[in-house]
Image (tube, grey):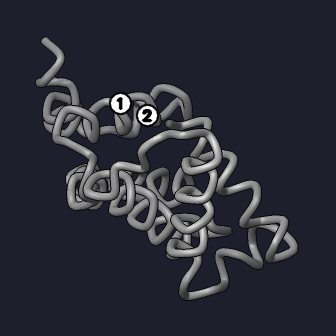
Amino acid sequence: MKTLARQALDKSCKTKSGYHRLMSQSDAGMRIWNNFQRICKTQSKKPYIGMNRSLITGLTHLARISPHNNPALKFEKLIRDGKLDVGFLRLFRIKGIKEKNARFILRDLVAVLGLEAEVAKGDFFFSLSMFV
């Protein structure tokens, strides 16, 4: 499904002349969702409306409100500001992202961005406690 979602994003970006232009549109999530449904139909796949629609529109909204439409930058700032819990809740509120997934995403972002030293000890335990 992630390949189909990527295809839907690519198609939506081409239609709107680029990623940032697409993200400037209030209906960007629905545009991507509609393309996702079309691609699923052409490949005889079910779009799983209940889960995928909320996930696609929720992640698109997150990108739209992030600096340069890049959620990693938003989370980097939250981590540096000692607000890992805010980042966790932001992810967890997106329907389709479960608690464990939100923790994995944040853990991976901390590692990829090299921010281990920026994470308060309590927050570090909070973010990794589910994996032990």
Q: Position of residue 44 (x, y in %)?
A: 54, 40
Q: Are marks 1 and 2 in contact (CB under 8 Å)?
A: yes
| Residue lying farthest to the bottom in this orientation | 26
**Vertical arrangement, residue 126 with respect to residue 6, above or below:** above
Tag 1: amino acid: Arg
Q: Please state if 4 lies on the left or on the right of 61 as rendered.
A: right
Give whichever of 3, 42 is nearer the camera: 42
Give whichever of 5, 119 is nearer the camera: 5
Q: Position of residue 12 (x, y in %)?
A: 72, 66
Q: Quadrant of residue 49?
A: bottom left
Secondary structure at badge 2 equals helix
The crowding category of the residue bearing disc 2, from other C-alpha atoms within 10 Å (few below 14, some 14 to 19, many at least 20), is many
Residue 107 tag number: 1
Residue 57 tag number: none
Q: Residue at x 87, y 74 (%)?
A: 17
Residue position for label 2: 110
Q: Gap in Å between the C-alphas at discs 1 and 2? A: 5 Å
Q: Residue at x 32, y 30 (%)?
A: 104
Q: Quadrant of residue 54?
A: bottom left
Give whichever of 29, 117 is nearer the camera: 29
